[in-house]
Image (cartoon, rainbow, N blue to C red):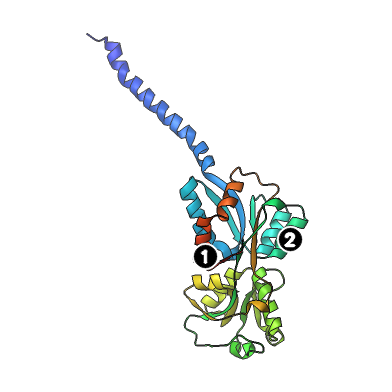
Amino acid sequence: MPDRHSVLAAPFRALAAALLITAVSLATLPAMAADAKGPTVFAAASLKNALDEVNDAWEKETGKRAAISYAGTSALAKQIEQGAPADIFFSADLDWMDYVEKAGLIDPETRKNLLGNKIVLVAPADSEVTAEIAPGFPLAKLLGDGRLAMANVDSVPAGKYGKAALQSLGVWDSVADKIAQAQNVRVALALVARKEAPLGIVYQTDATSEPKVRIVGAFPDESHPPIIYPVTMLKEASSPDAAAFLDFLAGAEAAALFEAQGFALRE
């Protein structure tokens, strides 16, 4: 016959074992969460839709997910210069990538010119405005009393490309005092989508992602410098997954996702 104390102790031993298993399981959770954390990426705001999809695909393949911070390229470059911790920089133009490289902050051997894009003139989806974008086209007349939404024309790539195109076409002077400048191209897009501006200049990829706007016309490629998105690993990258994520960005699966969002492949 079983000892009375043994019978009474059995449930307590089972409970203790269960608690031990639970404690071990809970102790592994932080490690598992750390393993699932991927690199920190600073990326141009115009990349958001496509890069989020690429990140989803990478997570599905690896179980890890990059932490992506989106903003105007100029703001990101300045943050990197000031020591903000990041592993990868995905710029919307060559100038700001050159700026960060000249500061000695990138691993130049990892730098790639990955994507291309176009800039377009957009209007609210229900607008009836039409225009043929050509030298001397009547942009000021099309704006009327409204303003032209653009990313900052002095620092943000989309704004710089837009200003260059308008200057090349001979219409900048007629609209220079009618510009509603935004901190990045997505904010400029939102101004048009909300009908706070009758027209705006944004990337084609942004325009096609927003159902509340429509493309009035595309700016000729020769009217502005080539739109190139370079990407690189930063010299102070600390994530062990930074190189793998950078390789994934340049791979076939990511290429298909970028192309589906309207980006052109550069390399």
Question: Foreground: 149 or 164?
Answer: 164
Instruction: Kindly check if marks 2 and 1 are in contact, taking CB atoms under 8 A apart as contact.
Output: no
Image spot of residue 221 (x, y percent)? 64, 76
Tag 2: amino acid: Asp
Among all residues in the image, which is located at the extreme left?
Answer: 1
Image spot of residue 116 (x, y percent)? 61, 67
Q: Which mark is residue 259?
A: 1
Question: Foreground: 261 or 48?
Answer: 261
How busy is the neighbourhood of tag 2: few (under 14 within 10 Å), some, or many (20 plus)? some
Task: Identify whether 20 is placed above or below 58.
Answer: above
Does residue 123 appear anywhere in the picture?
Answer: yes
| Residue plotted at (70% across, 47% down) | 236
Say whether residue 63 is left or right of residue 181: left
Figure disc tally: 2
Image spot of residue 4 (x, y percent)? 26, 11
Q: Which mark is residue 29?
A: none
Place residue 197 in its image quadrant: bottom right
Q: Determine whether the residue tagged by mark 1 lies in a helix, strand or loop.
A: helix
Picture quarter with the C terminus: bottom right
| Residue plotted at (73% across, 55% down) | 81
Residue linked to disc 2:
98
Marks 2 and 1, Cα distance to the nearest angstrom?
25 Å
Picture quarter with the N terminus: top left
